Image (cartoon, grey):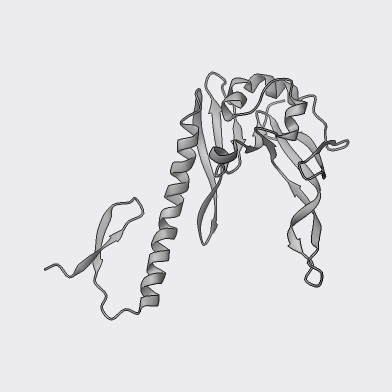
Amino acid sequence: MDSRLPAIGIEGHLELVPAVRHRRPLDLLGLWYLALDARRPLAERRQVHSVLAEVDGISIISLHSHIDVTEEINGTSISVDGHPDSIIRLGGLRHYEDTGRFYVSRIGNWRFNVSGRRHMGAYMTATGKPVESDYVGGHIVLGPGSPYSELIPFEINTLQDVVDHYEDLVDLFTTWPRESNPGTVTLEDGTTQYYYVVKDPSSPE
């Protein structure tokens, strides 16, 4: 009888590893968690590809990730068919299927910058009261109920809408506020978010 045991490989196939005898239950549990961590990047990549497979007229340029114990997918760059050198850079898509909302950091030549002050999840130890914090970011949120929808004169509720209106959006953002005089929107929690666009340095003049 083969003394080796099956283990889950990163691509989901089975491979044989030497059997380990007299291993403590805690060690086995740790190996199980490691196996799950090893599979998470693949699951995230599949989820991103599943979402984008529903969008017509695009090509995936690249996935963006960072390492936090394991790899985490935190963005995707896509191009629009028929528009040479086009680019739409999205944030993570983990919640797109549930909420319909998505983060966008760049469309065409234009990058987004936001800032404000709001409760970010911290509380005062002594009183339990929420603590507001200043924040800055490089994404705007689009999709159903987005406060930015009021600034766009056509419907942008889905990723497909962004693709279909790519040229219109690039033209629209030429009129959006710049850093010297940011615009404002009111978020769902009632706080004010400041926003402006910056032309990407790599873009042609």
| Picture quadrant of residue 25 | bottom left
Q: Residue at x 68, y 26 (%)?
A: 204
Residue nearest the viewer, comparing 179 with 164 = 164
Name the side, left or right, on which 90 lies relative to 109: left
Name the side, left or right, on which 49 lies relative to 140: left
Q: Residue at x 72, y 29 (%)?
A: 149
The N terminus, quarter of image: bottom left
Residue lying furthest right in this view?
181
Q: Residue at x 80, y 24 (%)?
A: 175
The C terminus, quarter of image: top right
Residue lying furthest left in this view?
1
| Picture quadrant of residue 15 | bottom left
With respect to residue 165, does 149 lie above or below? below
Name the side, left or right, on which 3 lies relative to 140: left
Residue 86 position, x and y percent, is 59, 26
Task: Report how many numbered discs are placed on residues in the image.
Answer: 0
Q: Residue at x 80, y 28 (%)?
A: 176
With respect to residue 16, does 144 lie above or below? above
Residue nearest the viewer, comparing 196 with 23 = 23
Residue 93 position, x and y percent, is 56, 41
With respect to residue 73, does 104 lie above or below? above
Residue 174 position, x and y percent, is 77, 24
| Picture quadrant of residue 141 | top right
Residue nearest the viewer, comparing 10 with 187 = 187
Residue 181 position, x and y percent, is 88, 35
